[in-house]
Image (cartoon, coloured by chain):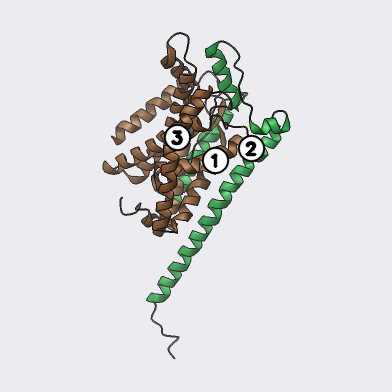
Chain colours: A green, B brown
């Protein structure tokens, strides 16, 4: 039971850390990833850097991956991960329940069956 | 050590808040085509022995006990989930976590390199995130260097008899941060500043990545502890097979 509360509190903290910036920094862009690093490279080298290799996907579809599709693929990634974890965790939880039930049965005196 | 670690984390968090006033954008993996060819090859070559070692390490673990597969799959899935979540940070930009700490603690650093490269390939091919040419460098930072630090810290905390969960938290969080330090150094090696050279450039890249990443590292630490608690409750037998339970 204690673990349950600990887990809940920890998850709450994690969620807070993730969400607070969104409200604390209103109007921030929350952009990310690829363009940023390239800007830094440009700043350091002083020139616009031309990547010498374009991502496979962009070559295939002749252009940048549309934002919506990108989030779809990110969701697919999350989904695969969550699916596996949830499936395995569910199996483990069930197994635990069964083991516990078996243990209880084993300790019980077998009164009703002998009769 | 415990208190000192906490002080360090606190200090870096404070520093991050100070530095984080300027909204900068951050990057996670090194972008496709952004490393000169020789560095791509160099990092690929450096990563290779770890991957080979990882393959054999996984094979050995599974040969010893088949049911370790469950936890291995979970560690991999954890990386999948965690590294797909882009989370807003105090700097006004988003970044995502690595999730490699769990696997490192359970299976060792080399095994994680295999799990990590699967995720990196997925993102490089489908998401144009990271890249095939920079795969070696990204594998080294996220799936080798970070997990090595995580594992080292976890072992250290065990030796120092720090509370197991605190140890896991520190290991996962610092491993996550270290991944970004390595990424910064990798970029700096390829793009040294005109004045100050590699070191100055590394500081520049770090100042972009670190503030964003500190809060995320904390989140990653927390999530790793949470899933570990779940496993301790429901997967005792599997953890025993991996030699996790008897120490503690």
Q: Nearer the viewer, residue A11 or B152?
A: B152
- The residue that appears at 43% across and 36% down in the rendered structure is B144
**Residue neighbourhood size for the residue with mark 2, other residues' Cα within 10 Å, grouped as few (<14), some (14–19), many (≥20):** some
- Circle 3 chain: B
- What residue sits right under mark 3 in the picture? B47
- The residue that appears at 38% across and 35% down in the rendered structure is B149
Q: Residue furthest bottom?
A: A115
- The residue that appears at 66% across and 37% down in the rendered structure is A71
- Circle 2 chain: B
In the rendered view, tell whether residue B211 sits above or below residue A73: above
Would you say residue B60 is visible in this rendering?
yes
- What residue sits right under mark 2 in the picture? B126
- Circle 1 chain: B
- In the picture, the disc for residue B66 is none
Q: Residue furthest right?
A: A62
Q: Please report contact status of discs 3 and 2: CB closer than 8 Å, yes or no.
A: no
Tag nearer the camera, 1 or 3: 3
What is the x, y in percent for residue B7?
34, 29
């Amino acid at each position: 039971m204690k673990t349950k509360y600990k887990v809940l509190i920890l998850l709450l903290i994690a969620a807070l850390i993730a969400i607070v910036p969104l409200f604390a920094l209103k109007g921030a862009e929350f952009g990310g990833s690829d363009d940023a690093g390239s800007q830094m490279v440009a700043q350091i080298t002083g020139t616009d850097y031309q990547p010498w290799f374009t991502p496979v996907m962009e070559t295939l579809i002749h252009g940048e991956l549309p934002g919506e599709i990108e989030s779809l693929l990110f969701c697919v990634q999350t989904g695969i991960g969550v699916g596996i974890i949830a499936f395995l965790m569910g199996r483990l939880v069930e197994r635990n329940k069964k083991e516990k039930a078996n243990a209880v049965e084993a300790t019980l005196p077998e009164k009703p069956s002998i009769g | 050590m415990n208190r000192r670690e906490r002080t360090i984390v606190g200090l870096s968090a404070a520093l991050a808040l100070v530095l984080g006033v300027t909204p900068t954008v951050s990057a996670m993996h090194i972008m496709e085509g952004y490393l000169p060819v020789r560095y791509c090859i160099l990092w690929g070559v450096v990563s290779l022995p770890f991957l080979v070692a990882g393959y054999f390490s996984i094979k050995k673990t599974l040969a010893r006990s088949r049911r370790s597969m469950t936890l291995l799959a979970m560690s991999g899935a954890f990386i999948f989930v965690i590294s797909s979540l882009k989370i807003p940070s105090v700097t006004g930009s988003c970044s995502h976590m690595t999730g490699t700490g769990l696997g490192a603690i359970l299976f060792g650093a080399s095994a994680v390199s295999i799990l990590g490269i699967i995720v990196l390939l997925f993102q490089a091919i489908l998401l144009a995130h990271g890249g095939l040419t920079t795969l070696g460098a990204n594998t080294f930072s996220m799936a080798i260097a970070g997990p090595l630090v995580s594992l080292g810290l976890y072992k250290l905390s065990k030796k120092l008899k720090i509370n197991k969960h605190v140890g896991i938290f520190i290991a996962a969080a610092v491993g996550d941060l270290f991944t970004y330090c390595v990424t910064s150094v990798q970029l700096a090696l390829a793009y040294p500043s005109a004045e100050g050279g590699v070191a100055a450039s590394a500081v520049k890249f770090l100042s972009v990545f670190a503030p964003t990443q500190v809060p995320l590292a904390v989140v990653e630490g927390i999530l790793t502890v949470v899933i570990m608690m779940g496993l301790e409750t429901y997967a005792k037998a599997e953890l025993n097979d991996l030699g996790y339970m008897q120490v503690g």
